[in-house]
Amino acid sequence: MHHFIAEAKKRIAPFPCEGFVVGSGDEDASIMLVGEAPGKTEVDTGAPFTGRAGKVLDEHLALAELTRKDVFITSVVRSRPYQVNGKRDKLGKLPNRAPSKKEIAAHAPFLDAQIRVVRPQLLVPLGNVGLRRLIGDRAKITVVHGKHLVQPILTYQDETYTFSSQRHELWPMFHPAATLHNPNLRPVVRQDWISFGEAIKAGLISGKGRSN
Ligand code: URA
């Protein structure tokens, strides 16, 4: 992994991003959560989902009777993208922004490597950025949230994305921050996580997925 981390740091260096959050959790986990990019808190703590969205994520995991120990948490981009022309906060930090295509590509080999190492049975993209990185730009979280998908995923090689020959299991979910921005989503998101927990109890996860 050291090689991939060094490479990812080098590839993100030209872009307005700061910090580097490797990911956290059990490398033997059956479930891998794929977020978007760290925010200010995550860059300070060095761990994913440790800010406001992280509190919501813990509540969502609890609805499925899961804890952070049951999952490996990573994200599409591992550094915090900031708005170069934004307004600085009290600590002089520029605001967060969504990662660009180039930033996503800069960290694509590292995400691919983590998926190969952890080999989760289920990939759980949180929001559109994670979803589209894994299954393409036409996917919409509003359409596939809370659904069990079995299909190839995008991997990045020679500066282009191609679909894997093997199929992977995915269970896309809304990003926890979505419910902070849009409280109307809360009942839907709660139900998605409750149903996810029920599916797990009913045998969705058959032990470590080794289909590839
Ligand atoms: N959003 C993410 O996608 N990841 C984090 O770690 C925090 C917020």
Image (cartoon, helix red, strand yellow):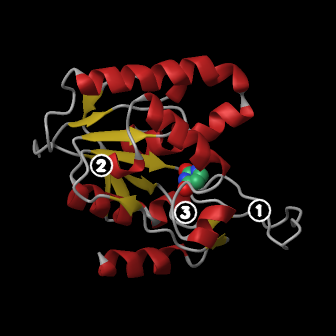
94 w.r.t. 201: above or below: below
SS category of the residue bearing label 3: helix
Drawn side of residue 30 relative to residue 12, left or right? left
Residue 65 lies in what quarter of the image?
Answer: top left
Residue behind mark 1: 83
User: Which numbered tag is attached to residue 54?
Assistant: none
Question: Residue at the spot x=89%, y=68% of the render?
Answer: 90
| Residue of label 2 | 162
Near mark 2 (Cα within 10 A), the count class, few <14, some 14-19 or many ≥20, is some
Q: Is mark 2 within 8 Å of ligand 1?
A: no
Q: Is residue 101 visible?
A: no
Q: Residue at x 32, y 20 (%)?
A: 198
- Closer to the chain start, of discs 2 and 1, is 1
Q: Amino acid at mark 1?
A: Gln
Residue 16, percent from left and from top: 67, 71
In the rendered image of this protein, does residue 108 appear above or below residue 186? Answer: below
Question: On the image, numbered disc 3 is attached to which residue?
Answer: 103
Q: Using the rendered image of the protein, determine whether residue 56 is visible from the camera's viewpoint.
A: yes
Q: Quadrant of the N terminus?
A: bottom left
Left or right: 143, with 185 as reference point: left
Please give the name of the residue rendered at 16% of the width and 43% of the height, measured from the top-left corner: 165
Distance from the alpha carbon under mark 2 to that under mark 1: 30 Å
With respect to residue 64, does 38 lie above or below? below
Q: Secondary structure at mark 2?
A: strand
Q: CA distance from mark 1 to mark 3?
A: 13 Å
**On the rendered structure, is 104 left or right of 202?**
right
